[in-house]
Image: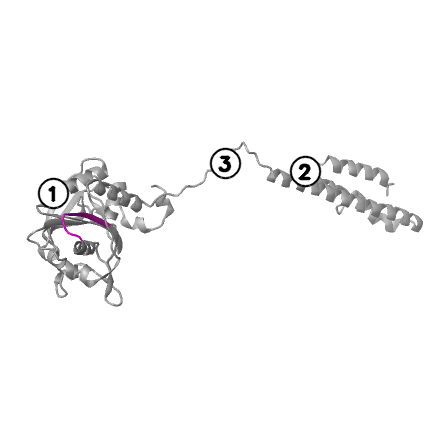
Amino acid sequence: MPKINLKLLKKQAQREINRAGDLKFLNEIFKKYLGKRGELTLVLRSLERMPKAKRAKVGKEANELKTFLREKFEQKKFSFAKATEDKEEWIDVTRPGKKLVVGHLHPLTQVKRKVEEIFQAMGFSVVEGPEAENEWYNFDALNIPKDHPARDMWDTFYLKDGLLLRTHTTPVDARYMEKNNPPLRIITIGRCFRHEATDASHESNFYQIDGLMAGKDISVANFKAIIQEFFQRFFEKPVEIRMRPSYFPFTEPSFEVDMTCLVCGGKGCSACQQTGWMEMMGAGMMHPNVFKNSGLNPKNWQGFAFGMGLDRLTMMKYKINDIRLLYSGDLRFLKQF
C-alpha cells in the first residue's frame, strides 16, 4: 500500500475539523478519516501486513492519532451544541410578545347582565331563590293543588325529603310576596329543570327570567308597555310582538307572548318550528289565590307576572338556531361571542 504520512494526515484532519461550519459537515469529515473506509481506518487495517518492527511504530502513532482526532471531533460537536443552546436562551427584548388568548363571558351570562341592566333601569329589583324547591312554593302557593291536572304541564325532577328541582322561577314571586308588601317590581333569573325531550328550542336545563309587578291599579296595558320597551332596548330596534290567550294556574287572564323570529326574519326555520314566530314568554294577571297564599288581600292589590326563557332570548339576540349549542361547551361556537 502507498506510504501514509501520519503527521501530514493529522494536520490535514485538524484543519478541516476547525473549518467545519455545522454538524453535518463535521460528520462528513469524521467519515473521511474515521469511518469504515476512512483514511486512518485503512492505515489501522494495514498493520497486519507490515513487518513486526514497523507495525509497532506505525500502530502506536496511528492509535494516538485516532484518539486525538476523536477528542477534536467531540470538542467541535460540543461547541456546536453550546452555540445552539446560547442562541435559544437569548431573548430579543425589542421583539413583540406573544398575544395572549383572553377569555370572555358566556353568551348566556352576557344576556343575563343586559336583561338585569334594562329592568333595573325601569325600576325593577333583581332577587334570587333556591334551585331545590319544595312542592308548596313550586306548586301549591301558585294555585296548583296536589290533585290539579295542571301539574302535568311540568315534567318534574323529584328529590328526597319532599324537595324537587324547580320547574320555573315563579316560586321566587311567592317567596318574595310573603316578606314584602306591594307595590312591587322584581325580576329573578335562574336555572330551571324539566324532564323533557330536547330539540332545537327545548332543553332539560334552561334559564328563565321571571318578573312580577304588583300595585293598586296595575293592568295588562302596563305589562304590554314594559315588555315592548324591554324588547326594543334589548334588540336595539323595534320588534313586533303578539299576545295569544293561554292558561296558567297562577294567572287570570293568561296569555303567551310571541315575537318575530329574528333567526329567519319571520320566514320560518327550525328554531321557530317554521312558524316565523318565536314563543318568548307566558304571562298574565296574578291570580287572586296567589296573593292569598302569600298573605296579601287580592281586593287591595293586583299585578302581572311573566316567565321568559333567557336561552331563547339569547338565540334571538345572536341568531342561534339550536338551543343545545349554548350547553355544548364547543369552543368553536363560544369563541364567536
The reply to whether residue 320 is visible in this rendering is no
Identify residue type, mark 3.
Answer: Gly
Of pointers 2 and 1, the one earlier in the residue sequence: 2
Report the residue marked by disc 1.
222
Identify residue type, mark 1.
Answer: Asn
Most distant residue in the left direction? 299
Q: Secondary structure at mark 1?
A: helix
| Residue 337 spot, x, y in % from top left | 33, 41
Residue at 9% x, 51% y: name it.
Answer: 301
Report the residue marked by disc 2.
22
Of pointers 1 and 3, the one earlier in the residue sequence: 3
Instruction: Answer above or below: position of 229 versus 295.
Output: above
Q: Of the residues tagged 2 and 3, which is closer to the observer?
A: 3
Quarter of the image holding residue 74? Answer: top right
Q: Is residue 181 magenta?
A: yes
Q: Which dot marks residue 97?
A: 3
Please state which of residues 159 and 1 is positioned toward the viewer in this rendering: 159
Q: In the image, is 327 to the left or to the right of 70?
A: left
Q: Secondary structure at mark 2?
A: loop
Q: Residues within 10 Å of mark 3 (few under 14, many from 20)?
A: few
Identify residue type, mark 2.
Answer: Asp
| Residue 180 spot, x, y in % from top left | 17, 52
Q: Which dot marks residue 264?
A: none
Magenta stretch bounds: 180-188
Instruction: Answer above or below: position of 317 versus 203.
Output: above
